[in-house]
Image (tube, grey):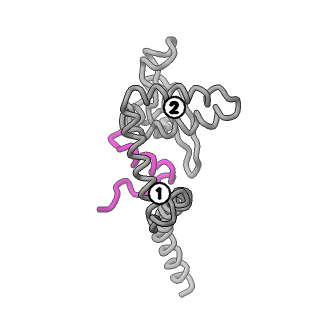
Amino acid sequence: MMKNIGKYILTGLVTMLPVILTLYLLYWLAVSAETLLGELIPQEIYFPGMGVAVALLAMFIVGMLMHTRPIRQIFLRGERIFYQLPVVKSIYAAFRDFMDYFSPGRKKDFEQVVTVTFGDTGMRLIGFVTQADDQLPEDFQRDYVMVYLPMSYMLGGYAVLVPRASVQPLNMSMEEAMRYVLTAGVTRLSTPV
């Protein structure tokens, strides 16, 4: 009896936790936008939800402006300042690289899911190609690829130069592979419909 109770509680936790965390993250983003931007709106015209609407409108306008050459150039000039400040450049560069991955115009080299074979052991790791031939140093351009190997249950991983002969493509989407690796293979490979 006690064994079944524990099993049911654990099943309930596993079922509810991803939903709760996702909803909480969305709630936190909406409340943060509402708090920060809602205070900037005069109280006479303010109504609940207007901060979120202003945040979405601001993102839309900035996104639209970034597709114009003069605004892009101004932004790049301003961005150079961040890359010259000692501590700020490390933090900004990391955030910028992470966000660039999600950019709609970015080339999707990172979406090539591969397995990497190490030595004669037959051991294979799942990774993602991050750099193609023309983007590597000259000594590695023909025979190597840069592969990111994420670590299970952690934020992090290893970027390794791997001989092209040790890499085999996998028929898996990047999202499926990342979810599979980060959970150490205990997740389902396809999302339920």
Write down the residue under mark 1: 186
Q: Nearer the viewer, mark 2 or mark 1?
A: 1
- Residue 161, position as x, y percentages in the image: 52, 25
Callout 1 amino acid: Val
Q: Residue 118 carries which label?
A: 2
Q: What stretch is highlighted in magenta?
A: 168-193
Q: Which residue is drawn at 45% across and 37% down?
A: 101
Q: Residue at x 34, y 58 (%)?
A: 191
Q: Which residue is drawn at 47% across and 59% down?
A: 51
Q: Which mark is residue 164?
A: none
Q: Nearer the viewer, residue 73 or 130?
A: 73
- Which comes before the other along the chain, label 2 or label 1? 2
* Rendered-image quadrant of the C terminus: bottom left
Callout 2 amino acid: Phe
Q: Which of 27 and 125 is in front in this view?
A: 27
- Residue 12, position as x, y percentages in the image: 48, 75
Q: Which of 189 and 27 is in front in this view?
A: 27
Q: Which residue lies furthest to the bottom in this view?
A: 1
**For this view, does 97 lie left or right of residue 86?**
left
**For this view, does 85 lie left or right of residue 117?**
right
Q: In this view, does 102 lie above or below 147?
A: below
Label 1 Cα crowd, 10 Å radius (few <14 / some 14-19 / many 20+)? few
Q: Is mark 1 on a helix, strand or loop?
A: loop
Q: What element carries label 2?
A: strand
Q: In this view, does 32 lie above or below 75?
A: below
Q: Which residue is drawn at 36% across and 39% down?
A: 64
